[in-house]
Amino acid sequence: MSTQTATPDAPPAPTQPRRAGRRSAPPPDRRGRGITSRVVVNGILAVVAVYTLMPLTWLLIASTKS
């Protein structure tokens, strides 16, 4: 009877353990697009707020002019 050494089917363990906790930052190109999209969304919301409040401002001014 011959003995054979069994090789594991699982892939070898990573050489360095993963750090737990902090997430890694996205690549620079994706981070830049994220900031740009946030600025665009905030700008659109600001414009919508101004145009929503403008008629109310006109009514307030008209009611106090008499």
Image (spheres, grey):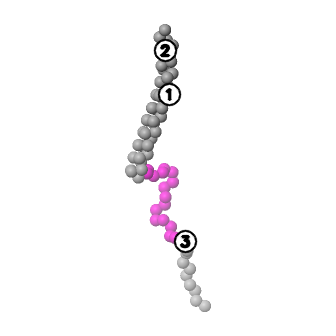
Name the residue located 39 percent from the left edge and 46 percent from the top edge: 32
Residue 13 is tagged as none
- Mark 1 packing: few (<14 Cα in 10 Å), some, or many (20+)? few
Tell me the distance, in whole angstroms, between the alpha carbons under discs 1 and 3.
61 Å
Q: Amino acid at mark 2?
A: Ala
Q: Which residue is labeled 2 in the image?
A: 62
Residue 27, x across and y down, in percent = 41, 52
Name the residue located 39 percent from the left edge and 50 percent from the top edge: 28
Residue 10 is tagged as 3
Residue 46, x across and y down, in percent = 45, 32
Residue 64, x across and y down, in percent = 49, 12
- Would you say residue 20 sits in the magenta stretch? yes
For the residue labelled by badge 2, is the local secondary structure a helix, a strand or a loop? helix
Q: Amino acid at mark 1?
A: Thr
Q: Report the side of 1 relative to 36 (left or right).
A: right
Q: Which residue is labeled 1 in the image?
A: 52
The dominant secondary structure in magenta is loop
* Labels 3 and 2 touching (C-beta < 8 A): no
Total labels: the figure holds: 3
Q: Nearer the viewer, residue 33 or 12?
A: 33
Answer above or below: position of 47 versus 24. Answer: above
Answer above or below: position of 61 versus 1. Answer: above
For the residue labelled by badge 3, is the local secondary structure a helix, a strand or a loop? loop
Q: What stretch of residues is rendered in magenta?
A: 10-26
